[in-house]
Structure formats: structure tokens, C-alpha cells
């Protein structure tokens, strides 16, 4: 860590306690305004939604100022045998940007919903697995039930996936967790599914929300560049939820300048924390192809249907629209679905924010698109015990 980064970190630790009284008073003022419908961030929102989004904004801002990232553990918790730890693959499989002298492939924890898949020899053609990478700006989140339980259940019940796998990839807020650590983990997870567990790539939907969607796109780019060398096929389809498509933009722009700032909970401190740490404070170019796909469109040789959801009220909405337009021009089969009036990442936080119905609708829309464009036969169902 450079001297400048150390000084900045110390300042944040001092600044956070000092600003706490002001943050709480502003929160109470905002909540008071929400009692009047036309003074809410969006007149479409209920009082419950307005209060919850404002609370999440407060918590995320404080979290961003203290810069306390999640500490990942490889032991089972409430997930019990639905959680597993897998080893990295052969070093030869981590090529190009994934070959790093400092950041090495590591063990990876993964949570399965509603249960682990059957042994490789018992995998059947009706299985459809969503490999989902969680959001959190690359600095928070863990892929466990406490973090991704709602989205995993929603993908099973309303998209119709038989299994959802949520890896707890390394975070850039931890030691040596900057790029390419998360992408190494993403490749480890994908190869475990298609090689160790014997799940055909044609039965895998690659999915991700926010930073996790950025990671999913990075994995597809890596497969595009190195898949033929190591016989790594593309997945059947992809679903991106409020994708973070321009990491460099977080370092160049102020979130407050977005016309959607008042209807979202994201803040500049959080965005810059994630962007600075995932790039290793400039070790990796944040504007490069693996971190800012918006600026680096590419053409796939194979068809890959991609469903994209954006909240109409989120600060990333314009970036997401521009991303879809640029990649369509490069031959991608992309369907953009805008959930009007919704803030960022309703798949991850829909139940917490009071946007559970909107998240369910978005997932049902994804199912419809993937059934038509990817030739899947997904059906809504509720497994026993879920």
C-alpha cells in the first residue's frame, strides 16, 4: 500500500465516527420527508420502499467510509453440506491475465441451492445450473445464504433452474484479493462444474449481479480468448443483473451527478473503494477490457443469448443501456429489460428493499427470453424444503 493510500485509509477511519451524527440526522430528515408521497425519491414507491432504500443508502455509505470488507471463511455455517470447498485447477489453466506472480489461484468456497448436484455419473439432461457471482463492488458479499439466499431461491423458483451455485470469490478488500483473484476463482468454479461435476456447459447459465455481472463478463472474455486452447466451452446463456460495466467510470465520475442519484442507494465512496481496490490501485488498468467491458466491446464467434436487467431508477442505468447497444452492434444476442422505478440490483436486495415482486417479475422475464433464445425449457417450480 502506498503512503497516499495509507493516509487516505487513516483519514476515512477518523472521518467516519465524526460524520456519524450528521449522517443519522440526515437519515431521520429523509425519512420524515418520505411520509409525504410526493417528497419521496420516487412517487411510485411505497413508504416501506422509500424508508428501506434510504436505510440501505445510510448503511452502505457508512460501510464505505470505514472500508470494512467481508472476511471470507471456508468453514460450513448454516448451509451445512450445501457448502463445499474446491481446490484450484492446474496452474497451466490460468493463462494470460490470470497468470500472476503475486496473485495465485486459491481454494474456493461455494454454496448450492437447494442442494448439491448429484455425482457426475448421475447428471441428467433436465438439470440447468445457474453459476451466479454475487455483487458488492468486489469489496463486500460472500455468496452464502445470508448474502445471496434470496436471489438463489428466486432463480430456482421463478427462473426454473434446478440448481444455483454461488461462489464466495476473493474480495479486493482483502490481502491480494485484487484482479485477477476474482476471475481466477470464477474460472475455478466454472471448470469444477463442467469437468469435476460433469455438468455440460450447455446446461449452465452464467449469471451475476452488479460487480458479479462484471465478473461474469470477464469470464466470458477469458473463455473467448483462451477457451480453444484449453477446451473450455462457453455456457448456454448468460443473465446479468444491474451489471457494473465501467469500473474506470467510478474513478472518473461523481455518482451524485447522475439524474438517478435520488432513486438509488449507491454512493461515490463505495464505487471508488471498489474500483480502486479491484484494480490494485492502478496495478491493473481499470479502463482495460476485463474491468470496463463498456469501453472494450468484442465479437463472439459463437451465439450466447444474454438477458440484461437494469433498474430504471439506478445510477448505472445509462451505462447498461450503452453497453447493450454497443455489444448488439458487435453481434451479441442481448435483451435489455428495464424494471421501471427500481433502484440498483433488485435481484440481490429485492426482499430487503421491498422490491421482491419486481425481482420476481424480472426473473420471469429472463426465463421467457432464455427459453426462446437459448432453447431452454425452464419452468417455475418450488422444490421441497425451499
Image (tube, rainbow, N blue to C red):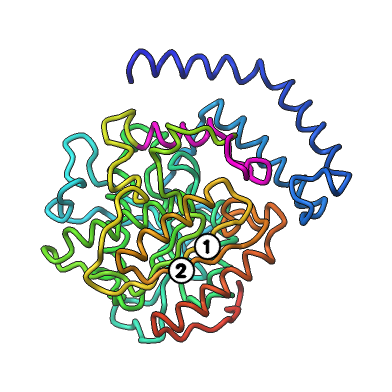
Q: Nearer the viewer, residue 296 or 107?
A: 296
The picture quadrant where one finds residue 170 is top left
Which range is magenta? 257-278
The residue carrying mark 2 is 307
Instruction: For the C terminus, give its image quadrant.
Output: bottom right
| Residue sitting at x 73%, y 21% | 22
| Looking at the image, residue 60 lies above or below residue 25 | below
| Looking at the image, residue 303 lies above or below residue 185 | below
Give x and y (percent) for residue 354. 72, 56
Q: Is residue 261 magenta?
A: yes
Q: Nearer the viewer, residue 364 or 14?
A: 364
Instruction: For the N terminus, give its image quadrant.
Output: top left
Q: CA distance from mark 1 to mark 2?
A: 7 Å
Q: Residues within 10 Å of mark 1 (few under 14, many from 20)?
A: many
Is there CB contact under 8 Å for labels 1 and 2? yes
Q: Nearer the viewer, residue 87 or 63?
A: 63
Give x and y (percent) for residue 314. 59, 49
Amino acid at each position: 500500500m502506498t503512503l497516499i493510500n495509507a493516509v487516505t485509509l487513516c483519514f476515512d477511519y477518523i472521518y467516519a465516527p465524526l460524520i456519524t451524527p450528521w449522517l443519522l440526522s440526515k437519515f431521520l430528515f429523509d425519512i420524515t420527508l418520505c411520509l409525504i408521497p410526493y417528497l419521496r425519491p420516487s412517487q411510485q414507491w411505497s413508504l416501506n420502499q422509500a424508508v428501506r432504500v434510504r436505510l440501505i443508502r445510510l448503511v452502505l455509505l457508512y460501510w464505505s467510509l470505514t472500508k470494512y470488507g467481508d472476511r471470507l471463511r471456508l468453514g460450513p455455517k448454516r448451509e451445512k453440506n450445501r457448502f463445499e470447498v474446491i481446490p484450484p485447477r492446474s496452474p497451466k489453466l490460468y493463462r494470460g491475465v490470470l497468470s500472476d506472480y503475486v496473485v495465485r489461484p486459491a481454494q474456493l468456497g461455494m454454496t448450492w441451492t437447494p442442494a448439491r448436484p448429484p455425482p457426475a455419473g448421475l447428471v441428467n439432461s433436465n438439470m440447468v445450473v445457474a453459476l451466479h457471482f454475487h455483487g458488492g463492488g468486489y469489496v463486500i458479499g460472500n455468496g452464502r445464504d445470508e448474502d445471496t439466499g434470496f436471489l438463489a431461491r428466486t432463480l430456482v423458483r421463478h427462473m426454473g433452474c434446478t440448481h444455483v451455485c454461488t461462489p464466495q470469490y476473493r474480495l479486493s478488500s482483502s490481502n491480494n484479493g485484487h484482479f485477477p483473484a476474482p476471475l481466477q476463482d470464477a474460472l475455478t468454479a466454472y471448470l469444477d462444474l463442467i469437468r469435476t461435476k460433469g455438468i455440460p456447459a450447455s446446461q449452465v447459465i452464467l449469471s451475476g449481479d452488479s460487480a458479479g455481472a462484471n465478473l461474469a463478463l470477464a469470464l466470458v472474455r477469458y473463455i473467448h480468448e483462451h477457451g480453444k486452447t484449453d477446451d473450455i466451452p462457453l455456457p448456454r446463456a448468460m443473465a446479468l443483473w444491474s451489471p457494473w460495466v465501467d469500473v474506470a467510470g467510478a474513478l472518473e465520475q461523481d455518482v451524485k451527478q447522475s439524474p438517478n442519484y435520488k432513486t438509488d442507494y449507491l454512493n461515490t465512496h463505495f464505487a471508488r473503494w471498489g474500483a480502486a481496490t479491484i484494480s490494485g490501485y492502478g496495478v491493473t488498468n481499470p479502463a482495460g477490457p476485463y474491468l470496463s467491458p463498456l469501453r472494450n466491446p468484442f465479437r463472439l464467434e459463437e451465439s450466447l443469448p444474454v438477458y440484461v436487467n437494469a433498474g430504471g431508477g439506478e445510477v448505472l442505468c445509462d451505462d447498461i443501456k450503452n453497453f447493450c447497444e454497443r455489444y448488439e452492434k458487435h453481434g451479441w444476442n442481448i435483451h435489455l429489460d428495464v424494471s421501471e422505478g427500481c433502484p440498483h440490483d433488485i435481484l440481490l436486495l429485492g426482499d430487503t428493499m421491498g422490491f421482491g415482486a419486481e425481482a420476481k417479475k424480472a426473473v420471469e422475464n429472463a426465463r421467457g427470453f432464455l427459453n426462446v433464445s437459448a432453447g431452454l425449457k425452464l419452468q417455475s417450480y418450488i422444490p421441497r424444503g425451499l
